[in-house]
Image: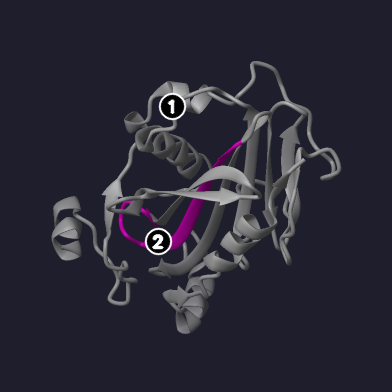
Amino acid sequence: MLFLLFSALGLNTPPNFPQLPAGYEWKDYGPHTIPDKYYDAYRPDYTLPVLKDSSSLPYAFELGDLKFDLGKGDSLYGGVSYMANPTRDLYSLDFSKGILWVDWGVHKEQDLTPNTLLNYYLVRARRFLIMDFLALPETPVEQISIGNEPAYRIRSYWWHYQCDGAGQRVGSLTFYFIHTERWDFQISCGTSIYTFTAGPPPGLDPEVTDSLRAIWEPEKTYPNNIRELERAVEQTFRPK
C-alpha cells in the first residue's frame, strides 16, 4: 500500500524510511482543504502583546524538561510554545525532547463534529510544522477528559519531503481540543523521529563539501517521546 502511494506521488523514500503502524496511511493535506473560518476562528483582529513569562497564562501544567519559549496573548486569546532549549524563534525549532504548543481563545458554542475537530487539527499542523504529508488512523478523533473537562485527541504522524527527496523528516503529532465554559484550548505535541539528508547543502567551498561527505550520515533516528508529552497534557494540564 505504501509503495503504491509513494509511486503515485512520485516520491523517493530512503531504504530505512520508517514504516507506519497498522491502520495509518499517508495523505497530502494541502491548505486548500481547510476552510478559512478555521484559520480565523480564534485569531482576534488586534495585535496580541508578547508574553515575557508564563505567570499570566489561563492554564497551568507540568512539562518536565520543556520550558516556556515564545508566546503572545492576553486573558482572551493567545498562543505559547514550549521546548527543551528555548530559541524565541518559530523557525529554529529544537525537537530534542519534543515541542508543545498551547493556543487558547474565548469559548465558542459550536458543534464539535469529527470533521470540525479535524479542521482545527489541520490548521495547527500546517501552522507549526513544515510538513507535506500527514498520516491518520481510520477513526482519528478520540473523546477523552482532561482535568474533568471534556476533550478530544487526534494522534498522527507528519512527514516533510523536499521536492527532490534530498531532505526528509518524519515525526509524531498529537492534537488536543479542550473546551471549557470560559476558554477553548488547542494543544499540539510534536516530535521528530527520523531525518534524511542526501549530502551537504549546495554552494559550499569544495574542500568543505569533501570534508563533510567523508563523515556524512544521511539518516538519523531519534527516540519518540510523544507519550511523555501526552502524559504531561492529560495528567497535569488544568485551566485556571
Query: Which residue sits furthest front?
Result: 148
Q: Residue at 73% across / 34% down in the picture?
A: 72
Where residue 108 appears, x then y in whole percent?
56, 23
Give me the C-alpha separation between circle 1 and circle 2.
Answer: 40 Å
Residues at circles 1 and 2 in contact by the CB criterion of under 8 Å: no
Query: Which residue sits furthest bottom?
Result: 214
Q: Main secondary structure of the magenta part?
A: strand
Query: Is 222 above or below relative to 240?
Result: below
Query: Which residue sits furthest top?
Result: 45
Query: Which stretch appears magenta?
Result: 160-179
* Residue density around tag 2, few if under 14, some if 14–19, many if 20 or more, within 10 Å: some
Q: Is residue 57 magenta?
A: no
Q: Is residue 171 magenta?
A: yes
Disc 2 marks a residue whose amino acid type is Gly
Where residue 236 appears, x then y in whole percent?
70, 57
State which quarter of the image contains the N terminus: bottom left
| Residue for badge 2 | 167
Where residue 235 appears, x then y in whole percent?
65, 59
Q: Residue at 51% across / 71% down in the picture?
A: 224
Disc 1 marks a residue whose amino acid type is Asp
Query: Is 160 above or below relative to 184?
Result: below
Nearer-N-terminus badge (1/2): 1
Query: In this rendering, would 2 be left or right of 98?
Result: left
Q: Is residue 96 visible?
A: yes
| Residue for badge 1 | 111
* Residue density around tag 1, few if under 14, some if 14–19, many if 20 or more, within 10 Å: few
Q: Quadrant of residue 17?
A: bottom left
Q: Residue at 66% across / 50% down in the picture?
A: 147
In front of the other: label 1 or label 2?
A: 1
Where residue 198 appears, x then y in whole percent?
38, 69
Q: Residue at 64% across / 20% down in the picture?
A: 44
Q: Nearer the viewer, residue 145 or 100?
A: 145
